[in-house]
Amino acid sequence: MKLLFDQNLSPKLVYRMEKLFPNSIHVQSVGLDTASDSVLWHYARTNDFLIVTKNADFSDRSAIEGYPPKVIWFRGGNSSTEAVEKALTENYLDIETFVRNPDQGVLALF
């Protein structure tokens, strides 16, 4: 499971989550920090990433366009990097199940 962390999340998450989610990246590391949602969507689809974001737009896009890519929508508001890390870690098994489920495109984490 490779994660593509959206601009609204800290690039530090790539290193903090490396053991659970190897080969994950942040949009900054591939020059997509100012890219449109459409470009990010295409990049994630083409390169087999799950998008991790605080942005509801990706959830909406998934409902309209389908998936892949799948979206992990962090709905914790203005939360710290530690809170996002904790949510991803504590929900790892749920994320694994989500990835395998062909009927789900968005996983909301609180």
Image: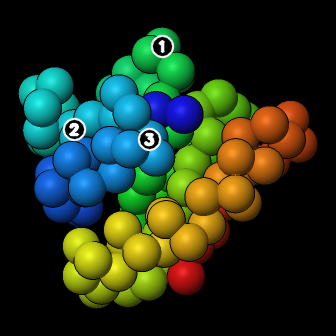
- Determine the CA span between mark 1 and mark 2: 14 Å
- Identified at 40% across, 58% down, the residue is 53
Secondary structure of residue under mark 2: helix
Is tag 1's residue or tag 2's residue first in the polypeptide sequence? 2
Please state the horizontal and vertical placement of residue 2, each as a whole percent of the image: 46, 32
In the image, which disc is placed on residue 14?
none
Question: Badge 3, how many Cα within 10 Å: few under 14, some, many 20+?
Answer: some
Quadrant containing the N terminus is top right
The residue wearing badge 1 is 46
The residue wearing badge 3 is 21
Secondary structure of residue under mark 1: helix
Colour scheme shown: rainbow
Secondary structure of residue under mark 3: loop
Q: Quadrant of residue 23?
A: top left
Please state the horizontal and vertical placement of residue 30, each as a whole percent of the image: 16, 25
Image depth: mark 3 or mark 2 in front: 3
- Determine the CA span between mark 3 and mark 2: 15 Å
The residue wearing badge 2 is 27
Say if 70 sits above or below 91 in the image: above
- Identified at 70% across, 57% down, the residue is 93
- Identified at 21% across, 38% down, the residue is 27
Q: Quadrant of residue 29?
A: top left
Front-most of 41 and 85? 85
Residue type at tag 2: Val
Image depth: mark 3 or mark 1 in front: 3
